[in-house]
Amino acid sequence: MRNLVSLICGTLFGAGLYISGMIDPQKVLGFLDIWAIADGGWDPSLAFVMGGGLVVAIPIFWFAKGRSEAVCGGDMNLPANRAITKKLVIGGLLFGTGWGLVGYCPGPALSALAFGQLDTIIFVVAMLAGMAGTRMMRLNG
């Protein structure tokens, strides 16, 4: 049952990314380019997508916070650590830099793989290599 719910949620997430245009890196970069506000070329649609995501996520997290078991069974794995650490800040800076340079974050990049564009494939391979490298550094350090 959990796998079916996961499949449905993942499919819904990917469909939402496609419908909103967030798998197009140029649309994301159009939002991140704040200098385009002056010439009217700024695209605010990402803010609406993020706002819509918050409208859905906040009540669900509020509901989940009071539970010890997931609705479909199993333990709840909500983060308990709220500390702002050096690793968190560096990770956020790296994520934001990559997002701003390329226009992809992991979810939209994986969804965009369905279109088979070479730049998306290169990004996902680089992303996976970076994830593997980080894991190896953690294990060895």
Image (cartoon, rainbow, N blue to C red):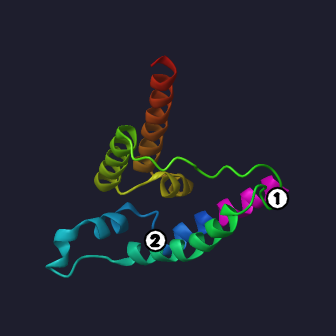
Q: Find disc 2 in the rendering and name its residue.
A: 50
Tell me the crowding category of disc 2: few under 14, some 14 to 19, or many 20 or more residues within 10 angstroms, Cα based.
few
Give the residue at x 63% y 69%: 62
Residue underneath mark 1: 72
Q: How many marks?
A: 2
Q: What residue is drawn where x is 45% and y is 23%? A: 137
Is 49 positioned to the left or the right of 3 in the image?
left
Q: Residue furthest top?
A: 140
Residue 92 percent location from the top left of the image: 36, 48
Judge from the rendering whether residue 128 lies leftward or rightward of residue 36; answer left or right.
Answer: right
Task: Depth check: give the residue in front, 23 or 61.
Answer: 61
Magenta region, residue range: 1-12
Between residue 135 and residue 18, name the one nearer to us: 135
Q: Secondary structure at mark 2?
A: helix
Dot 1 or dot 2: first in sequence order is 2
Which is in the foreground here, disc 1 or disc 2? 1
Residue at point 49% right, 37% down?
128
Give the x, y percent position of residue 108. Answer: 49, 58
Query: Label 1: how many residues lie within 10 Å, few (<14), some (14-19) or many (20+)?
Result: few
Q: Quadrant of the C terminus?
A: top left
Q: Secondary structure at mark 1?
A: loop
Give the percent coordinates (x, y) of residue 43: 31, 76
Residue 88 falls inside the magenta stretch: no
- Residue type at mark 2: give it: Met
Q: Quadrant of residue 42?
A: bottom left
Label for residue 47?
A: none
